[in-house]
Amino acid sequence: MNQITSGYSRLRIVLWAGAIVAAVLVLTFATFRTGDDPSHRVTYTGEADIRANFSLINHEGRSVTEVDYAGRWLLVFFGFTHCADICPTTLAYMGTVLDVLGFKAEHVAPLFVTVDPQRDTAELLKEYVAAFHPRLIGLTGSEAQVSDAAESFKVYYERFEEEGSPDGYLMAHAGHIYLMRPDGKFEAVFLESGQPPEALAEEITMRIAKEMRNK
């Protein structure tokens, strides 16, 4: 096993450890719900201390905050462009969810927030997210801005040095997809492996319909 392969093996161990910590954090505040088929409809919902509160730079180079996406449901994933497997898999999954949503995707702002702002410039993110879906929005910023955004969403990430890896380091991070309400409050958290994209699209569709009925 070479150094890079060994590094990614270590990364996956740290990543999944962080994912478990994040899941426990969410469960501390949340209620477990299932639909008729638990294997296809698993979500965690509740009033967790998770907020859409950020000041970042989008992939067009423009400064944005959560206010720029007010009135839309946020589908948020934290990762980085040098990620070997979790990130491209999850972003492809989000792209499929958007396709399944069809015209209802207009009610959703899909955000990919980098945890590696040192390498992930706005220009790089623009090219990267376009490979997965034209609606995906890449967000970056300073180290402090990314840290603040991650804290708002209670997202785990960590840089660790790894000789032989690109630029000598890797990033570990939790792999959750957050669904936030149009008012910026927490609604649910998902894992790409937790349900097929059609099931997540159905979950989002039901929430959009309920919101419209309550207006």
Image (cartoon, grey):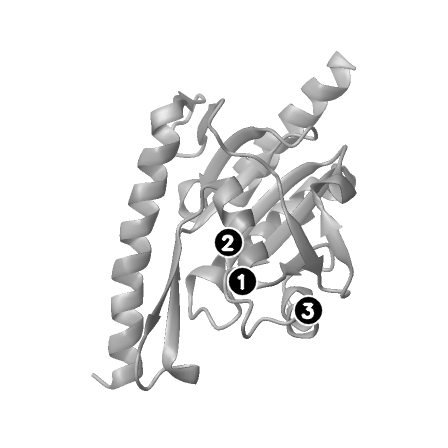
Residue 8 drawn at (x, y percent): 31, 72
Q: Sequence-wise, which precedes: disc 2 or disc 3?
A: 3
User: SS at mark 1?
Assistant: helix
Q: Amino acid at mark 1?
A: Glu
Q: Say which residue appears at 38% left-offset and 72% top-offset.
A: 170
Mark identifier at residue 122: 3
Could you tell whether 77 is left or right of 66 in the image?
Answer: left
Q: Amino acid at mark 3?
A: Ala
**Residue for badge 2:** 147
Q: Are marks 2 and 3 in contact (CB under 8 Å)?
A: no
Residue 56 drawn at (x, y percent): 66, 55
User: SS at mark 2?
Assistant: helix
* Image quadrant in which the C terminus is located: top right
Q: Are marks 2 and 1 in contact (CB under 8 Å)?
A: yes
* Image quadrant in which the N terminus is located: bottom left
Cα gap from disc 2 to disc 1, whole angstroms: 6 Å
Q: Say which residue appears at 31% left-offset and 82% top-offset.
A: 4
Q: Residues within 10 Å of mark 3 (few under 14, many from 20)?
A: many
On screen, residue 50 above or below 85: above
On screen, residue 181 above or below 69: above
Using the rendered view, name the quadrant where residue 203 is placed: top right
User: SS at mark 3?
Assistant: helix
**Residue for badge 1:** 143
On screen, residue 29 above or below 80: above
Could you tell whether 86 is left or right of 70 in the image?
Answer: left
Q: Amino acid at mark 2?
A: Ser
Q: Say which residue appears at 44% left-offset and 46% top-offset.
A: 155
Judged from this view, the residue extending furthest toward the left is 1
